[in-house]
Image: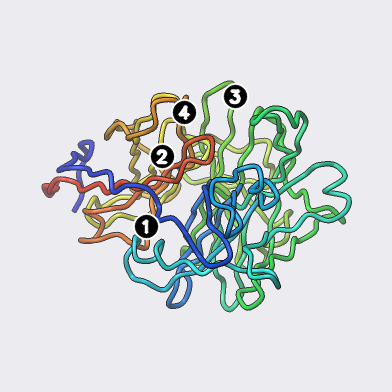
Amino acid sequence: MTTSLPPRLRYARHLGSFPQVRTPQYVIVGQDGGQSIPLAGETLFLFSDTLLIKAGVPGERAAAQDHFLANSAAVASAPDLFGALASLEYFHDADGMPREILAADARDRFRRVRFWPEHGLAIGNKIYLYYLGVQTIDSDSVWGFRNLGAGIAEFDRASGEALRCRHGGDWLYWRNTADDLHFGVHTTLVDDFVYVFGSVRTGIQSTAWLARVAPQYITERDAYEFLTSSAPEWIPDFAQAGSLGPAAAEFSVSYNRHLGAYAMLYVEEYRKRLMLRTAPHLWGPYSEPADLIGVPHLQDSVFVYLGFEHSSFQQQDGRKIFVSYCEPHFAASSVLTVTFDEVANA
C-alpha cells in the first residue's frame, strides 16, 4: 500500500510501564533506554543508567546508589513485547547482580566517564553496538554531564561483555563537535550495507543524518560514508553530512508494510508528542513530521526522551506498532501501542 497523505491513527493506547524486574537478589527501580535488537530466536535489550535496590532493603533509596549502573543489558525470547519485558534475563556478575556490559577502565573512572549504549545489529555470528561516552562535570546536578562522542563495540552474547573497538588507540571514533551528537541511534542491514542513523542537536532542535558502511568494515571508521542528499549521494567526510530534517536525539526507522514506506518515529522531547515521518527509501526524502498523539507522562516531567519503535514486534504488517519512551528521575519507561487507520491504495 502507498499513500501521499499523512498516516491517520485508528487509536492509540498507553500500555503502562515496563514490568518491574524483581529477583531474590535485587529490584530494578528504574532505567533509561530499552532499545531492542532482534537476534536469532531472541531479543537483546540495551539500557543506559540503571538504578537497583539490593534485596532485603526495600525503600532504602540511599543504599541503591551503591548499585547504580551506567549501562546494562538483558535478553528475552518471548514473541510479544510485554512478554519479553516481563521475562528479561540480565547479564549478571559473580554475585548474581546485573552488571555493566560497557565497562569503564581506570582511566575512564579517573575522568568520570561512563558509557550509554545506542543501537546495534547482528552481522553473522557477531553483534555490534554503538555507544556514547559521557563525562560527569558537575556531580551535584542530575544533568551535570557532557557528551564526548561515540564509539563502537563488539558484544559477546555468551559472556555479556562488549569489547570496545579502537581507532588510533582510542575508543572515541566520532568526537562530539555540536551541542549533542548521537551516532548509531538506529541501525539496519539492507542489501550490501549497514545503514547507521544519527542525530545532531543545536540548542533544543535535533536533526537526523545517515551513514553507511560495508558490513565487513563496520569497525573501520574511515570506511564510513555519509549521505549528502536523497539522490542518494555519499561522501567520506562526516563534516559534510547532509540533514534528513527534524528528529529527536533518539529515534527509530523501520520499513512499515502497512504504510508502504519507511517510518521514522520519535518523541518530541519538550512538547511530549509522538511524531512520525515517512519516506519511500531508507535515505529519504522524509515527509514533514506528522503529529500523532501526546504521550502520557508524569506531571513533573519537564520533557520525555528516548522514544522509539520496537519494530520486530510489529503486528498486522505494521498497522499496529509499539513505541517506548523514558522520563527523568528513574521513572519506569512507558509503552504505547499505535494502530493506524486503513490505507487506501494510491
Say above or below: 207 vs 31.
above
Q: Which residue is mark 2?
A: 266
Q: CA distance from mark 4 to mark 2?
A: 13 Å
In the rendered structure, find residue 202 and report the number of the disc placed on it.
Answer: 3
Q: Nearer the viewer, residue 267 or 188?
A: 267
Dot 3 crowding, Cα within 10 Å, few <14, some 14–19, many 20+: few
Number of residues whose C-alpha sits closer than 10 Å to that of mark 1, classed few (under 14), some (14–19) or many (20 or more):
many
For residue 298, above or below residue 238: above
- Going by the image, does 291 lie left or right of 25? left
Please tell me which of labels 2 and 3 falls first in the chain: 3
Residue drawn at (58%, 65%) of the image? 25
Counting residues from the start of the chain, the first of labels 2 and 1 encountered is: 2
Which residue appears at 53% of the width and 37% of the height?
249
Disc marking residue 311: 1
Q: Secondary structure at mark 2?
A: strand
Horizontal arrangement in the rendering, residue 213 relative to residue 221 (left or right): left
Give whichever of discs 1 and 4 has the lower sequence position. Answer: 4
Q: Secondary structure at mark 4?
A: loop
Residues packed near mark 4 inside 10 Å, few (<14), some (14 to 19) or many (20 plus) = some
Earlier residue among tags 4 and 2: 2
Circle 1 sits in a helix, a strand or a loop, which is it?
A: helix
Residue 48 location, x and y as percent? 59, 49
Judge whether 152 appears above or below 33 on screen: below
Between marks 2 and 3, how big is the CA–CA gap?
17 Å
- CB under 8 Å between discs 3 and 4: no
